[in-house]
Amino acid sequence: METKKQMEIILKEEDVDKKIKEVAEKYRKTVSVKGFRPGKAPVDMVIAKYREEIENDAIESLTGDKVYEMTKENKFKIIPPVYIKGKVREGNNWIVKVEFEVIPDFDVTGYDNLPIQRRVKRVSPLDVEQRLKYYQETLAEFYPKEEGIEDGDFIQVKYNIFDEKGNILAKEKEEKFEFDEKNVAPIFYENLKGKKVGENVEIRTREGDKNYVYKVNVMDVRRKVLQEIDDEFAKSFDFENLEEFKNKIEKELQEEASRMAERDMENEILRKLLEINKFDIPESLVEDELNAMMDEYKIPQNEKGEFKEKFREAARERVRARLLLDKVAEKANFKVSQEEIDEEVRKMAKEYNADFLGFKANLKKRGILGVVERQILRRKAMDFLKSRVKTEVVIE
């Protein structure tokens, strides 16, 4: 189904004139008319001064109403905005050409007994040990050392960068980092290893076809000390002993593995159904998704063009997945109660440590309660799909 629509809307002259007066009443409250205070100028004078702007607003308003009325009759789900591509007056009517996008009408099939694997990762003792080491790192302590730099030390350096002619390119830059072969470029690793606090090092590098000189001063060297993983270590995390701590970690890892398996299974359901069910999507929704992704990942302005090009297909698949779930929810006639919305908002308020009523009022003011409702509907649609597919559990 074509997602871009074009229409001609016919507006009666008397309707436009009536709307012009309504719009002018709003204008007169704020606009300036010589000789009158704001809100006191006669409507006819406001219309005479701002005729073009008021007429455009009136036609735009009437056109929008007509388009939504017509698309509702044709069961189109319109995506704002409606673009006016041209307008002309013919006799007692205005002929307005408009363009807009709609959500395509399609059916979702192929989910009954669709073969799906739910792959669950088995939690091993090694996984538990790795998590323990992660917690061990959180309690690491750092002590100044006089000896030379070794792997695992945390160091602070100050440096200047010069080109091959001796011109300074960067002055008094400072960095802190953990010193090891994985974390430090080879040329810097070789030249800094063994150096002590206060020492200066000159490092010559070639990057591309240019030579650079780094003049580095070692400002601080600290030795990382890790607490031994034993019962005392476990008590730091409010456990009686190490065995209890390990049991808790194993349970957490199993829950994480289960959530990951569930998420991967849901993604597989959507991937397979999107392969079966082909439908067009409005490009405006893809653009909206790309903009949301760039906001989420805080993409700098100068990198946005490249990001859009690279992730357009990923954004398109996200949109298609949401539209598919929306169609499943519509087909199954799922509804969302006010109680369900309130429960979801309570969870959100709790996450932000906010008062429920105030948080809900803020979401309503920002028009986000509708988003919450759609999220609940999509979850219901996914639960429905999971109940209809044929699932094979695989323990890895």
Image: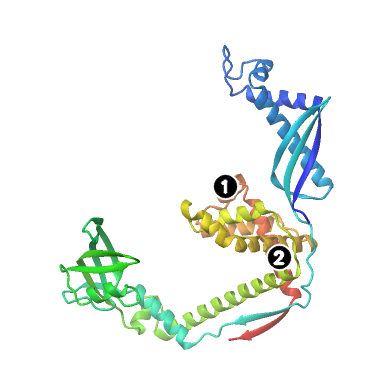
Q: Quadrant of residue 11?
A: top right
Secondary structure, mark 2, is: helix
Residue 154 drawn at (x, y percent):
27, 71
Q: Among all residues in the image, which is located at the extreme bottom? A: 125
User: What is the three-letter code of the residue carrying label 2?
Assistant: Lys
Is residue 392 or residue 214 the one in the foreground? 214
Q: Is residue 112 left or right of residue 395?
A: right
Q: In the rendered image of this protein, does residue 250 appear above or below residue 105?
A: below
Q: Is residue 378 left or right of residue 152?
A: right
Residue 279 drawn at (x, y percent):
75, 61
User: What is the three-letter code of the residue carrying label 1?
Assistant: Asn
> Which residue is at a point 74% across and 40% down the rendered structure image?
98
> Which residue is at a point 72% across and 60% down the rendered structure image?
326
Q: Are marks 1 and 2 in contact (CB under 8 Å)?
A: no
- Indicate the quadrant containing the C terminus: top left, top right, bottom left or bottom right: bottom right
Q: Among all residues in the image, which is located at the extreme top? A: 35
Mark 1 and mark 2: span between their CA atoms? 25 Å
Q: Quadrant of residue 286?
A: bottom right
> Which residue is at a point 17% across and 77% down the rendered structure image?
147
- For residue 362, the mark is 1
- Indicate the quadrant containing the N terminus: top left, top right, bottom left or bottom right: bottom right
Of mark 1 and mark 2, the one earlier in the sequence is 1
Q: In the rendered image of this protein, does residue 207 appear above or below residue 367?
A: below
Q: In the rendered image of this protein, does residue 149 appear above or below residue 89?
A: below
Is residue 54 or residue 307 the one in the foreground? 307
Residue picked out by circle 2: 380
Q: In the rendered image of this protein, does residue 85 appear above or below residue 130?
A: above
Residue 9 drawn at (x, y percent):
80, 37
Q: Quadrant of residue 2?
A: bottom right
Is residue 305 or residue 294 the one in the foreground? 305
